[in-house]
Amino acid sequence: MPHHDLRVAIYARVPGESQAKEDTIARQLEAVERRIADDALGCDPELRFLDDGVSGRLLVRPGLERLRDQAAAGAIDRLYVLDPDRFSRKYASQGSLREELDRCGVEIVFLRHPPGRGPEENLLLQVQGMIAEYERAKIMERCRRGKPHAARRGSVNVLRGAP
């Protein structure tokens, strides 16, 4: 397919309300759109899939569901994503999404991942996925331990639930 006829899509996600308020989704979009422009391409606004303030723990998310539907319909040739962990912090989920999109003929461009599809690049992507999963587990552990400590200090956020 000629370069100028590529149907380009964007996927961006931030996991929680605090990150959403800090405009991290806007920063992701800025970086991705800059890369698309550097590649001399454009993105139809209908092919921008955003999950703002949605956890990546589950694969059923509004933006991701729309992306998967459009990919299955053959409406996307290339997908730009800042980092593989925007799909999920679970390695297995990242892999299954990449395989699904690959079967649909979608080329995925991760801005924070070297290009290529050789064994070294695949290994690096797998290791990064496992590290992201480990990172998520450590964050959950720290939150679990931090809530009782905060409660003992008297700084419980009643809007977030019990520690």
Image (cartoon, rainbow, N blue to C red):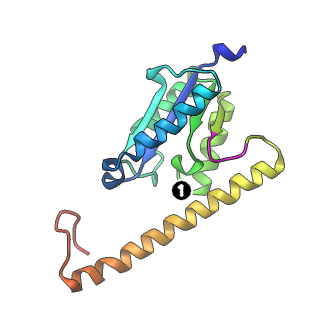
Coordinates of residue 55 in the picture (x, y in percent): 41, 52
Let me know if residue 153 appears in the view.
Answer: yes
Residue at the image point whose x is 30% and y is 49% from the top: 21
Q: How many marks?
A: 1
Magenta: main secondary structure: loop
- Disc 1 is placed on an element classified as loop
Q: In the rendered view, would you say 73 is above or below 154?
A: above
Quarter of the image with the C terminus is bottom left
Residue with the mark numbered 1: 89
Residue at the image point whose x is 63% and y is 34% from the top: 101
Residue at the image point whose x is 31% and y is 52% from the top: 17
Inspect the magenta stretch and tell me whether residue 139 lies in it: no
Let me know if residue 61 appears in the view.
Answer: no
Quarter of the image with the N terminus is top right
Name the outermost residue toward the bottom.
Answer: 152
Coordinates of residue 45 in the picture (x, y in percent): 44, 22
Inspect the magenta stretch and tell me whether residue 111 lies in it: yes
Q: In the rendered view, would you say 19 is above or below 10?
A: below
Residue at the image point whose x is 50% and y is 64% from the top: 136
Is 38 placed left or right of 13 in the picture?
right
Is 45 placed left or right of 75 in the picture?
left
Callout 1 crowding tier (Cα within 10 Å): few <14, some 14–19, many ≥20: many
Coordinates of residue 37 in the picture (x, y in percent): 58, 26
> Which region of the structure is painted magenta?
110-114
Q: In the rendered view, would you say 162 is above or below 16?
A: below
Quadrant hosting residue 79 = top right
